[in-house]
Amino acid sequence: MIHDISLKNFRNFERLDACFSRKINVFAGANGQGKTNLLEAIYFLGLLRSFRTSSLADLGRIGTEGFFLSATLDTGKGWKHLLEIDYSDKRRLRIDAAPVHKASHFICQFKLVAFTPGDIMLVTQNASVRRRFINMLLSSADPIYLAALNSYSDALKMRNTLLRETFDLGSMLAFEKILAENGALITNKRREILTELTPEMLRIFRSIRNDVKSFALKYAPFNGSEDAGSYLAKLSDTRARDVSKGYTTIGPHTDDFDFVLNGRSLRHFGSNGFCRLASLCLKMASVSVIAQKGDEGSKVITLVDDVTGDLDSAATDAFFETIDKSEQVFFTFTEVPGNGFFDCAEIFHIADGHIATH
Ligand SMILES: Nc1ncnc2c1ncn2[C@@H]1O[C@H](COP(=O)(O)OP(=O)(O)OP(=O)(O)O)[C@@H](O)[C@H]1O
Ligand SMILES: [Mg+2]
């Protein structure tokens, strides 16, 4: 669990230090005060990314240069870790005061699932949103996946440069080998987690709606086979086409998966309400499924931004039942619900970039 956090010049916080409850924490306050910014800081400490922008320049407080974030993690096994991120002229990462040079060694310190108002886009928008979701989910839980993803992305950039600029067969073959080996692993792990998420999603969906007969997350990898050998052969087959296009046309960077409810694709046939519910069920199933992944001793930290307001009572019950399985939860609310779930919560009042405990 996250024991405490410290922010400097992050979003609208000039300076903030807070010590958290082991289980339920609530950031409460009026609109525009910094509640989501705080969740974003926690997310950034876990994944070195934001859930709402890809532009790091947005994260530093306007008018200042760079930002600083730190958190103390309590492993529950008798020791603590201090994570520090210092973004100024360049990024400096430290764990327990020792510099960490690779992002992949910093990420995976804790497992993370974030519920956000934009989650419906997982169902309705294009494939890149779903790839990003699955990459973030697996990255926070599985260091092997993260390492493969980084190697794959680096090799992809290099192959694309070769395709566009000076073609050199020796280098091309070397990058294709890296793509095939890591791509096969990525495809395998994606298939595995989607296979694990499906029954859990179906169970949750049925607990909310009794008209759900069947549900599946249908994975459509570019390559039916997951072995590196057939992958390598496909890369070789498509090389001439890739040269003419100037980029790599096959690989897990083109993957997608579909939400199929009662035999129909939700993206194409689903009502807004069902799409919203499916995205919520996916995140709920993620909490249970990644708890079993990687280091099972490290449990899931869940972030919930403005999510429960428009849910009916069955969905709300399912939601709180699932959330209760996480080790520690951080909510944002303008008004804290009068729900028994929050009786023991630590409430933090957020006003204009400042925090006060109730
Ligand atoms: N880089 C930045 N520097 C300074 N202020 C920022 C920066 N980025 C965002 N803000 C400010 O942060 C505030 C928004 O914070 P946040 O999104 O956390 O609000 P919130 O409390 O979650 O509100 P809501 O209830 O509407 O979701 C806005 O006032 C915005 O101007
Ligand atoms: Mg907000």
Image (spheres, rainbow, N blue to C red):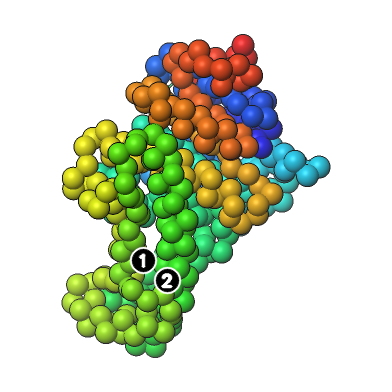
Task: Give the farthest residue toward the right.
Answer: 78
Tell me the SS state at disc 1.
Answer: helix
Residue flagged by tag 2: what amino acid is it? Answer: Gly
The residue to which callout 2 is attached is 183
Circles 1 and 2, Cβ within 8 Å, touching? The answer is yes
Q: Residue 253 vs residue 326: left or right?
A: left
Query: In this orientation, does residue 69 appear?
Result: no
- Quarter of the figure that contains the C terminus: top right
Residue flagged by tag 1: what amino acid is it? Answer: Pro
Q: Residue at x 61, y 57 (%)?
A: 294
Whichever of callouts 1 and 2 sits on the residue coming sooner in the sequence is 2
Q: Position of residue 205 (x, y in %)?
A: 38, 40
The residue to which callout 1 is attached is 252
Q: Position of residue 299 (x, y in %)?
A: 63, 44
**Quadrant of residue 315 within the rendered picture:** top left
Tell me the SS state at disc 2.
Answer: helix
Closest to the observer, 200 or 237:
200
Q: Residue at x 61, y 20 (%)?
A: 345
Closest to the observer, 62 or 180:
180
